[in-house]
Image: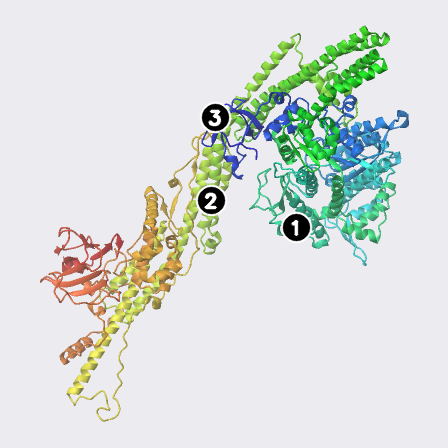
Amino acid sequence: MDHSTNWTNDDAGGLCWVSDPTQAYIEAVFKGISGNIATVETVQGQTMEIDIQAPLAGPSRKQKEPPRRLLQRVPVESIALNGVEDMDNLPSLHEASILSNVDLRFRMDKIYTNSGPILIAMNPFKWLPIYGEEVIKSYHNRPYGSQAPHCFMEAEDAYQQLIKTQLNQAVVICGESGAGKTETTKLMLQYLSVISKRYEGGSAADGMTMGEKIVESNPLMEAFGNAKTLRNNNSSRFGKFTALHYSPQHTITGCHITNLLLEKARIVHQAEGERNFHIFYQLQAGAAAKYGLNGGATSQEYTKVCTTVSDMNDTEEYGLTVKSMKAVDIADAEIDSVMKIVAGVLQLGNVKFTNSDNSAVDGASSGALNAAAGMLGVSASKLQHALVHRVREIAGEAPVASPNNQEQSVHLRDATSKSVYSKLFDWLVTRINMTLDVDSASNPKFIGILDIFGFEDMRVNGFEQLFINTTNEMLQKVFNDIIFKKEEEEYNREQIVWDKTVFPDNDPCIHMLTKRPIGLLPYLDSECQRGMAASEGEALVRKFNQSHGNHKFYEVCGPASVWRRKDGKRTQNEDFLVHHFAGPIIYTVSDFIDKNRDALYGHVHDVLSESTNPLVASLYPQRTEEDNVASSKMTVGNRFLSQLQQLVGMLRASETRFVRCIKTNETFSPSVVDKTSVLRQLVCSGVMAALEVRRAGFPSRMLFTEFVREFRCFSGKPPYPSNDKDLTAKMMKHPSVAGRVTEAQYRLGTTKLFMQADVLYTLQSIKNKAIEPYVRRLQRWWIKNQGQIQQHKLKRGTYMIARLTEKAKTEGVHHVAFVQKILAAADAARLTAAGNLNRENVSALLDLCETAEANVDKAVQQKAEAYRIRAEILGVLDGFSARLEAVKAEAATLYNPEAKALLTSECDAAEMALTSCREEQTAAANAWDQAVMADTGEQTGGLRRAATRANLYASASKVKMGNASAQEQAAARDGRMAEAKSMVPPLEELCARLLEEKRLMDAARAQYADAIDQASYRLDTIPVDQYIMFGITNVSDAVAEARMGIDQAHKMLNSMDPEGFKAAVKYAAEAVEKAIHKAIHESSRMQAMSDLDEGDKVLRDVYEMAATENVLEVPGFQGLCSSAQQDIANARAQCMIPDVHTLQASVEIALSSVEACHDAYQHNFVAKRRADRDKFNAVKNMWEGKANDNPEVPSANRRASGSGKALFKVKAAAMPELPTAAEKGQLFKREQKAPVFSAAAPSSLPDVSGLSGGGAAEVEPIPAAEFHTHVDGEGRVLEDVTDADRASDMEYVAKMAEAGSLGEWIDANGLSSYKEQICSYAAELHDLVEMTDEDVDELISESAMPKLAGRRLKKAISELAGAQVSRPVGDSNLGVSENAPGIAMEPPQYVLEELNEAPPAPTEEEYEADYAAAAAVAPPAAPSPYSFADDTPSSVADAAPAFDATEEPVAATGISSKFSDAAKVIVVNDDFTKYVETVGSDGDTAIGYRNTGPKPFSLTIDFGASTNTMVKEHEGNATPSDLRVTQVVQPNGMMVVVVGAADLAAGTYQYKMSMEGESL
């Protein structure tokens, strides 16, 4: 990469180049640097800040343009004025200096520049006076480098080297379409033809020479092989290698033309704005009536896309084509046959077919069919039958015919047209070779000129582009080998140490394209052999990807990988990318197999072989079996690779030189340079790399023997070394040489002397100066010896006049008045001296000759200065024009039509002013060229230039200003130019302001489009079909309304009303949120109804079991059931409100109440069974005791009484146990009875306040609360988000941070026993937050957690996620709602007693009392589950039993004076012990809470609002009248409360304990 980073503030004021996306490079002045940011000021007055490190970073797809680069600029006065002819001599070698040099020379009409062995030819898009006879004479027999660079110099060098070395010579002319390759080829052929003619000695009577015939064949080849494209009006659509054969006498004796890869697809299809081959239009313009072509080109299917080309007269060109055909000895009858075939192809394209599976020729086009058949000389009926049928031929079997559909018939018609035309083109090339290739030698020496298409990168690159670019890749390989590898091999072979430069190697790319068996082209051939099973399109690309997917020159394409550079669109699966030398190119595989087969059906071939047109019949000879086999194996790829290998072989066997043609602009405008495009072409063609390699080493080199022979004058005095190498070393140290050539400027190899670029020229100058006295002495001796001094002076004067006249014509100054005058005077003096030869007349002649030489040189200098000034002015104008083009391009992207119209109109006005200035400046300078154009206008050399000449004279007339002087005219031009330039900066400022508004509008649209897409995505997640299946229609209605809102918002985004599309997007977002809320609510409602029905069923079952087991008589149980019934009723009422969270909380409360009833039933059932067992054991013991004491009482054991048989069997009652969590299973079968749906939170929308039609303010987002809906961890919509919600989100983040790791969280929440099971479900805390209720239930079940631990886990997860807790879940009560009366119960004492061993037997009195009490109690009737009795417990001790099996009584310790040893002691857990004892005469109860753990806890006791009596006594920091008592209990401390009996009876007593903020 050309980029300089070593800038410091010491460089301030230095000159530099700045890269620019529109002008390639801009001249600037370095101002300073701060950090990595350099500040520069361009010559146009713009200040730029450039990050000098940015270009070093890798490319980013998000960058719209590459970062700017800085390069040093070294001004050299001579170079700045005129440039350099050979860029080896540039003082600084980088992209900017090379581009500046070719640009400066181009504007001075010096379109040729050397870069070492490469000639760079800039297309001027105008005719220049540098190709006439005088110019040809000036280059002939001149050594290479003695004249200015020119294509004639390359042709002359090839000619001289052919004579000198007897080796074949080749010139490769490359460049993209429109670069001037065809014109350059014709000019070089013209030069070689003229030179050859001088040696042939022929006359006009002898007819045209061979060289002239070759030149005259060009119009024929162009007519049939060239076409108008978007990039070139006369683009060669085939490759051509012209080999000129030379005789030993150095004259052209023949020529052989090889054509490569005609673009046949153009025959039947052309892109918009492009034409078919020229001959189709020439024939219709020049002989339409003769060949039945009526209606013009627009009426023909194959030529209607584009019909005309500027500066091209098709009628005139037709005449030139016929003339060219006659020049190569094509007879009139053959010409007629050729034109009939062309007309037949045109008529064949007009044949239409019916749209059916069994298609036929449309009746309306039967005339076209008959005309085509007539021109091709075949039967119309047979041709029709052949086009609508396809015949498959299988070896050894009869052919099988089947009808075509319309598409197949059209395809076969086009295939026939392409086959006929391509065979005709091949025949023309062969016919030309028959005339031109007449050299009798078996292997004649030749000069070959290759004119071939350059790299192509179209919008869609297909089969043709793959072959074209493969050709260029192979030619680039030849170029690399000659320019790069030969350099390295030469240095290595000669053992020269040099600055090696890494050069590109495209061998891997060529192997990937052409190497068998899996190269892309061989792979394509192998697929063609598979017949109907051949892969095409995406399937073929998949095979390419499998074979080359990992190749560094290949890249897999697809929607998720590669984007197209030209239009920014995604690639498809039918595409693949090849990294060519010229850059990455994407190919689309379409019809590759058919195009590669390129085989015409045999039955169509047979029809054409029967033609009465002899030319058609010769193109399609009768088929043989061998022909069928050969044609099946021969593909386009086979033929192409074979021709390409032969071509490359010829180039490698020849001395090859390169001409790189450069297209200067895309508008075909003269004197206009698109610097960005020129720079790209220079880089892609390898010019930059070649120049660097050449400059790094020693480009000039000579064999030691040749050097010694050429510069023997430096050998000095004897003795001389015995070998040429040592003698060369001695000669380079000669005093005359050593003073001007240092040792660093040359190297001695093993066989050659290597020199830097200017050394050879310096040695030649030293030699000339050294031998000049001897040469002059010899000349004087010869003149004196002849005795004709005056005659010699006369000859010298005559020669000087001829030379100056030729120089004046060559330099284009022969029309200048003072030049004409002095040359006329000198010629008159010559005539006088010739008539009267004396000293005075000869002296006068020589004086006039010297004056004439000075005047000619003066005129040349004036012209050069005028051209230089014009180049400078045009360069400035081009810079402003490029800036204006950039403004116009940006204006086309604006949305506001008024702003776009305003900016466009102003740009048009500025463009007109700049164009007018350009025309004036060009016209003023063209005054030098008018007379020269008149002299050279009639010379041969391509298509007519009449329009160019007319424009030249027309523009010259614009420069006249009445009677104003030249100074006044120049001042007026300068004033108009300054005014035109001043119009551009305000337009740039206006454009920048409008673009900023557009950017803001685009940003707003993009954000709103994203919001719409997200809303649409969220809407698509609603399973509408499921809701309809469940009979819910309001969800689908809401979704339909939201969808309409989204569609309307999409339409509004294209409007210019920011507030309008904001309102539309807002409405759509709200509609989507409403639909989502409706869907979630309906889903939750249906699920809630299902869950409540299940809860109601369970409650009924519990009530029935309780009635059956006499549990209803337990105090408080019916109140508990009544509360559960009320909770279910409340939850059903919540189903009608839209608050989903409240509904779900109500359902959970109801189900928890039912669960509490079930738990109470189980506990009481177990307690009752234990009591029954105790009673039974007591009776049993009493009975056995009485039997022992009283013999009269019969014993239960009959054996003991002697009967030997037990009276009855007594079986001990089993101890009933509460089921564990794992044994208990799931109480409720909460099956999914509604659509499952949850939605994520929507994104916020941007603000467009302040935006006008183009946007005028920065886009700021609207607060999220405007559209944001709060969604809980399960995706349930809760309520609109407020600031408090966002604060809670922040608290959640902080809480997650405080929680630490997962293991710490488990330990902190007392779940260490279940750490392994929890960790198997979650890897980190965030995983716990994302767990659903079902996940938590599953974890509890599989971990066999007790209910208390399970609730503790649920609560800890809820608190971690920040969810609202609708009811206490970690309470040591039954865990039901706070406002459910009569269900907070203390466990009765008998439930907590562990019956590990039988209690002592009761006494007889106790037994009788118990028996009487049991008999007196009758089981109550079971009431209806929906008419529960209001059976509230009378005290906490009478309530339903607790469920914690770890509670057990312990002995009282008398810690507080309120409690005696008889107090009931309950160990709740390791950290908490509870004491209960009745005190006082009023039945008051003292309750104590002792902290037995290591940490303090906070205890709150709440008596409710309906308390009838007060707290009588307590230990804490509140007054006795408080209804809520809170105290922090330290370790081993106790809080004691004395509560009145009425408070206990009211059932409103609750307590809550927490440790370190965590509920226990």
Q: Is residue 89 visible?
A: yes
Nearer to us of marks 3 and 1 is 3
Q: Which residue is mark 2?
A: 1014
Residues marked 3 and 1 touching at CB (< 8 Å): no
How crowded pointer 3 is (Cα within 10 Å; few <14, some 14-19, many 20+) is rated as few
Q: Position of residue 301 (x, y in %)?
A: 74, 38
Helix, strand or loop under label 2? helix
Tell me the quarter of the picture where residue 1486 sits: bottom left
Q: Depth check: give the residue in front, 63 or 1208.
A: 63
Q: Which residue is mark 1?
A: 540
Q: Position of residue 619 (x, y in %)?
A: 84, 43
Q: Can you say which quadrant of the picture contains the C terminus?
A: bottom left
The span from disc 3 to disc 1 (Cα, nearest Å) is 60 Å
Q: Which residue is mark 3?
A: 10
Work out whether mark 2 precedes mark 3 in sequence or the reverse, and give the earlier one.
3
Q: Depth check: give the residue in front, 696 or 1469.
A: 696
Q: Can you say which quadrant of the picture contains the N terminus?
A: top right
The span from disc 2 to disc 3 (Cα, nearest Å) is 55 Å
Q: Residue furthest front?
A: 719
Check disc 2 and give the amino acid type: Gln
The span from disc 1 to disc 2 (Cα, nearest Å) is 37 Å
